[in-house]
């Protein structure tokens, strides 16, 4: 069995984006304090930083509108 197959079995659908290593990890990885997630797929985890940046921008714009 390949490493990819073992990671898929271990993760059972949970993926994280590691802020320490700046990469997607399966459930068994760095401590959660260093990660964003969990996400249902590798692709969702890979987009974690972009979604966070988009949300921050939207919140900043909403704050400016309130002022």
Image (cartoon, grey):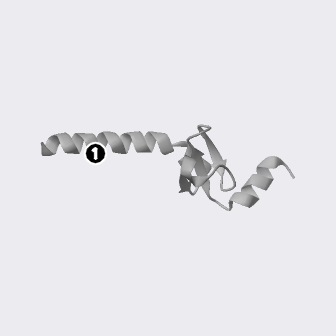
The structure residue drawn at horizontal position 79% and vertical position 54%, both measured from the top left corner, is 6
Q: How many labels were placed on the picture? A: 1
At a point 68% along the width and 51% down the height, the residue shown is 29
Residue topped by disc 1: 59
Query: Left or right: where does residue 15 sit relative to residue 7?
Result: left
| x and y percentages locating residue 48 in the rendered image | 50, 45
Q: Quadrant of residue 12?
A: bottom right
Residue 52 percent across, percent down from the top left = 42, 44
Q: Is residue 43 visible?
A: no
Left or right of 49 on screen, residue 66:
left
What residue is at 61 percent from the left and 49 percent from the top? 42
Residue furthest left as drawn: 67
Q: Name which quarter of the figure residue 13 lies in.
A: bottom right
62 on left or right of 11: left
Q: Residues within 10 Å of mark 1 (few under 14, many from 20)?
A: few
**In the image, residue 62 above or below residue 14:** above
Helix, strand or loop at label 1? It is helix
Q: Position of residue 62 (x, y in %)?
A: 21, 45
Q: Is residue 11 left or right of residue 32?
A: right
Q: Quadrant of residue 53?
A: top left
State which quarter of the image contains the C terminus: top left
Q: Is residue 48 visible?
A: yes
Give the residue furthest to the right: 1
Residue at 29% across / 43% down in the picture? 58
């Amino acid at each position: 069995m390949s490493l990819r197959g073992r990671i898929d079995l271990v993760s059972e659908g949970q993926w994280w984006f590691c802020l320490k290593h700046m990469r997607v990890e399966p459930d068994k990885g760095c401590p959660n304090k260093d990660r964003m997630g969990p996400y249902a797929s590798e692709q969702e985890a890979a987009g974690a930083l972009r979604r966070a940046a988009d949300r921050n921008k939207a919140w900043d714009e909403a704050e400016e509108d309130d002022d």
